[in-house]
Image (spheres, rainbow, N blue to C red):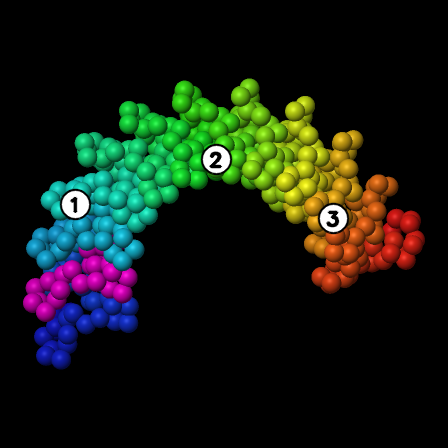
Amino acid sequence: MTILLGQVEVNPDKEDEDGKTPLWCAASRGHEDIVKILLARQEVDPDKLDQDGRTPLLAAIKGGHEGVVDILLARQEVNAARPCYNGRTPLSYAAQCGSEGVVKILLAQPEVYPDERSYGGRTPLSCAVQSGSEGVMKILLGLEAVNPGIQDDDGRTPPSYAAEFRSERVAKILLAQPEVNAAEPSHNGRTPLSYAARSGSEGVVKILLERDEVSPDEPCRDGRTPLSYAAEVAREGVVNILLGREEVNPDEPDNHGRTPLSYAVGGGHRSIAEEVAKILLEREEVNPDKPDNHGRTPLSYAMLGRDKAVVEILLGREEVNPDKTDREGRTPLLYAAEDGCEPLVKALLAREEVNPNKPDNRGRTPLMLAASKGHSEVVALLQPYEAGIHSAA
């Protein structure tokens, strides 16, 4: 390196196609000696931006190189609070990386504000929560300037991210803060419980349900409850926990008319979806044939999940009409035929109530749609019915 820098024609601050200089590259790899050699040259700008607006300091922080961070911050030209083009500050990156030493170094700089809202309005604490960095969280929470309940541009608080990323320990740390509202909804109306339910974090769900301000059946702006979100992604444990609360309505429709059962059977989470469907159907309040605002029933949505076991469960219920049409005149068989799911087509054709030739509002039959999609196996199953032969294939 010293030999190269001694050559007149060598530019020690030359950028590559991404705007990265030798200093940037050395800082990103943690090469302290090389960083010192380069900084000794007057031509080298220690705070130069690459094409993404990232400085050598940011590069060192992302790499977790505490020594390089110290060296760079000893230079007056280096701004410890300078954000890159996406708005993220050095402290934001350090917090998300879980670099406690770097966080402490940055907080010692007068220009660094510990609760600075950067990209998306998110604070360093919010970033630390997302990565589960308890050490960084405790450092930040020990500062008076840090508000653990502050909302970002989406209205989400640090507890909301703790719930989504399934961290019980982080959730406990945050909920111990007096400023934190465990039921604070984001701009879309989703609460921390809603996020915890969808992520399947049983521990966080239990922690939140212990709080008086948390309603276990609180809907978001779309009318979806925590149970609805848990059912959609087949979070069996969370579904059981929520159904254990008498405030929870297991058949509550959202603004689109879809119930938790509708989401459970249409989510495509095989085997687990089957268990969640069974749990919901054990409840007397649950109508297994309840149509949504478009007239689609759980059986209709089960065609999307392509799970024969779930379909068989629904077909086993007397209340379920296997030939019910939605607002477009489409039956479950029509959806299954268009999707080319042979096992589901067979299961539906085995039912006497199912008319294999029933067209939708546009006059399209199951055979037409199967043929148009190139589903030859399904076409072979349906063709005899179109020809007037009504024996099962």
Residue 124 in the image, given as x and y percentages of width and height: 26, 42
Question: Dot 1, how many residues are within 10 Å of its Cα: few (below 14), some (14-19), or many (20+)?
Answer: some
Q: Nearer the viewer, residue 28 or 3?
A: 28
- The three-letter amino acid code for the residue at tag 1 is Val
Q: Which residue is mark 2?
A: 220
- The three-letter amino acid code for the residue at tag 2 is Cys
Question: Dot 2, how many residues are within 10 Å of its Cα: few (below 14), some (14-19), or many (20+)?
Answer: some
Labelled pair 3, 1 in contact (Cβ < 8 Å): no
Q: Which residue is mark 3?
A: 329
Say which residue appears at 28% left-offset and 42% top-offset.
Answer: 123
Residue 191 in the image, given as x and y percentages of width and height: 43, 33
Report, in whole angstroms, how far the alpha carbon at label 3 lies from the one at label 1. Answer: 61 Å
Q: Is residue 231 above or below residue 58?
A: above
Residue 5 quadrant: bottom left
Q: Nearer the viewer, mark 2 or mark 3?
A: 3
Horizontal placement of 352 versus 296: left or right? right
Q: Is residue 40 magenta?
A: yes
The magenta segment: 39-64
Residue 99 quadrant: top left
Outermost bottom residue: 9
Q: Which mark is residue 112?
A: 1
Horizontal placement of 300 versus 231: left or right? right
Say which residue appears at 16% left-offset and 60% top-offset.
Answer: 47
